[in-house]
Image (cartoon, rainbow, N blue to C red):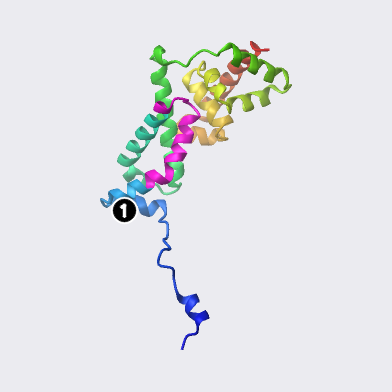
Amino acid sequence: MLDGANLARLSVPVSQTVELPDTELVARVRAGDETAFEDLFNRHRLRVAKIASRFFCQHEQIEEIIQESFTKIYFALDSFSEMKDGTFAGWLARISFNCCYDELRRMKRRPDTAMNAISPEEAAWLGNQLRNDQAVADIESATIARDLALKLCARLDPEDRFVLVMLEVEGMSVAEIAETVKWSRSKVKIRAFRARAFLRRVLKRFL
């Protein structure tokens, strides 16, 4: 006869649930299980929102990127299943980055959607920050992580801005960026150099 200790070891809590891996959820979606896609959406929505917030500050823009990203993801699940390597999260991030890039290019063609100019208060704050830091590279990395950086980076060419955010904020390597947007590594390096040089010129105006 089993004693209490043995019974405790054998019993499994009824309320305990096992979280399915992304690949299993993808397989279920492809088999027609719509609730599985809801699980994927709920699991990865914040990641897409975080990516979008690196480029856009308005809630409506971020929500638009989320919807566009997951729409593309839904209709491209077959291509993900054919991949031999890589994670769903990484694949999703690449799609989200590309959605952000497309929106940046659309914004460039719509001047009315440009961000507001930097206010005198923001300019004074930024000037104080820059004068208190001697390393320009550190200033770039610190500034781009702030909300104010969105306004500064809005002055960059879309491709330059895209690369700079991926490098400085997301911490991606040149190789990873090249793979994400299907550019050569040389093009990524050139865009990064141009973006940094332009940002330095902008920052110097506040010194």
Q: Is residue 111 left or right of residue 133?
A: left
Residue at the farthest bottom position: 1
Q: Is residue 41 magenta?
A: yes
Return the x and y of residue 67 as percentages of the image width and height: 35, 34
Residue stretch in magenta: 40-61
Q: Please state the horizontal and vertical placement of residue 92, each as a whole percent of the image.
A: 42, 40
**Disc 1, SS:** helix
Q: Looking at the picture, does residue 150 appear above or below residue 49?
A: above
Amino acid type, label 1? Arg
In which quadrant of the rendered image does the C terminus lie? Answer: top right
Name the foreground residue: 16 vs 140.
16
Q: Residue at x 41, y 63 (%)?
A: 15
Name the residue located 49 percent from the left edge and 76 percent from the top edge. 8
Q: Main secondary structure of the magenta part?
A: helix
Q: Is residue 20 above or below residue 195?
A: below
Is residue 60 visible to the viewer in this orientation of the structure? yes
Mark 1: few/some/many CA within 10 Å (<14, 14-19, 20+)? some
Front residue of this view, candidates 146 and 183: 146
Residue ID at (41%, 36%): 95
The mark tally for this picture is 1
Image quadrant assignment for residue 104: top left
Residue extending furthest toward the left: 32
Q: Is residue 190 visible?
A: no
Query: Residue shown at 63%/24% (left/top)?
Result: 140
Q: 52 or 79, which lies in front?
A: 52
Q: What residue does disc 1 label?
A: 28
Q: Nearer the viewer, residue 23 or 46?
A: 46
Q: Position of residue 118 (x, y in %)?
A: 55, 14
- Is residue 16 magenta-colored? no
Residue 55, percent from left and from top: 48, 26
